[in-house]
Structure formats: C-alpha cells, structure tokens
Image (cartoon, grey):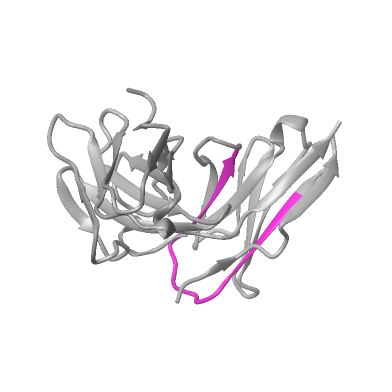
Amino acid sequence: DQQVKQNSPSLSVQEGRISILNCDYTNSMFDYFLWYKKYPAEGPTFLISISSIKDKNEDGRFTVFLNKSAKHLSLHIVPSQPGDSAVYFCARETSGSRLTFGEGTQLTVNP
Amino acid sequence: GEEVAQTPKHLVRGEGQKAKLYCAPIKGHSYVFWYQQVLKNEFKFLISFQNENVFDETGMPKERFSAKCLPNSPCSLEIQATKLEDSAVYFCASSQSQGPGQPQHFGDGTRLSIL
C-alpha cells in the first residue's frame, strides 16, 4: 500500500517567517510527489512537484525538498503571507496517474 | 474553458434516489479524474478517463456507481440508489496528458448530501 502521511494537522506561523510542511511516505516506488493548496469550498490548486531523480525543486516562494533515505518530503514557504492560509496536501502519483493524498495540514499565517 | 467546471455545486437527495454529477474538463485536456472527499480532508480516487475511454476504474465501488465521458458532452458521475454514506464532496480534475508529474487541475467540487 503506497501511503502518504501528514502528521501535523495544523501549523501557525507569523507573516514573513518560514512555513515548513511535512509529509512522510511508505514504499520506495514512485515517480512524483505533488503539493496542492486548498481553500474552503474550492478545489485543490497545484503548487509544485518533485520527481524521484531530484532532491529539491524551487518555484518562487515555494521549495520542496525530498529526502529519499528518510522517505520524507517537505514544502517550505518563505516568506509566508496571510493569503497562504489554507489546507496543504501532499500527494503521490501512482500508477495510471491517480493521486494518493495525505490528510492535509491547515496552515494559518498570522499578520 | 480555462477551468474545470462542476455542476451542480450542491445536490441534495433522499436515500435511495439517484444522483448525477457533471464535469466539464479544461478545453484540450484529455484526462479526467474523479475523487471523493468523505471526511474533511480524506480524498479517495474513483475513476479516470482518457477522452471517452475508461483509463483506471480500480477505485470505483462495484455497485451503484457509474461514470461516462462522451464526446462533446460534460463527463458525468452517477450514483444509483444513494446511501447515507455517499454524502461527500465529489471532485473532478483534468490534465493535459498522462505521465509523471502532470498536474491535475481540480474543479470546486459538488457537495452531495443524502438525507
């Protein structure tokens, strides 16, 4: 069973500081991990992805790090902004491109 | 269009009635995916299509659930004889192609309430 786990249901940070969202996974067979952001009453919005051949991918304020030996990935947001307050999901792409999502982490950025 | 359009936004049905949900993928996207979000943050994959062909249906309940993507029509997800546990938000997503790292673009979902 190829699972992804987000063990922190919530995270609160001050505006301007760094937000670090974490995700652990089982099984070492994968192609890509993706991060999505979700606001209430909206669908998930794609943020950034990382493939198994990389250990880092950066896009503006968002950076994803992959530690294959620890089976762990993290999303860094810096600087954090109040508009970043949302639920963040990590997802792994499995066979047939289906996504398996983690449980999500509610990020709150305080002004 | 430039967004995945799901209709209706909210659907209420009595237990045992039929429910039908619709999804118009982004123009030019060949792949359509359906997910069910039962608890607040738990997504379950249901089915995917490549154009009008079923691509992966391993997540679909064997009974009561069916889905179609016909040419020149919105895709649909139909639930026969609904049960209370079918209450969920159903998300549709589309992608331009199938392959590693192709992001799926999600609609805003249909909230199905079974009374």
Q: Is residue B102 left or right of residue B78?
A: right
Q: Is residue B33 left or right of residue A67?
A: left
A31 within the magenta span: yes
Observer-nearest of A3 and B67: B67
Quadrant of the image for the N terminus of chain A? bottom left
What span is in magenta? A20-39
B81 within the magenta span: no
Q: Position of residue A9 (x, y in %)?
A: 71, 57
Quadrant of the image for the C terminus of chain A? top right
Q: Position of residue B18 (x, y in %)?
A: 26, 47
Q: Can you tell which quarter of the image residue A103 is in?
A: bottom right
Question: Magenta region's main secondary structure?
Answer: strand
Residue drawn at the location 34% of the way across and 40% of the way down: B94
Observer-nearest of A29 and B81: B81
**Up-down: is A66 above or below A49?**
below
Residue A49 appears in the picture as rendered: yes
Q: Where is residue B56 in the image (x, y as percent from the top left)?
A: 25, 59
Residue drawn at the location 82% of the way across and 47% of the way down: A12
Residue drawn at the location 35% of the way across and 52% of the way down: B15
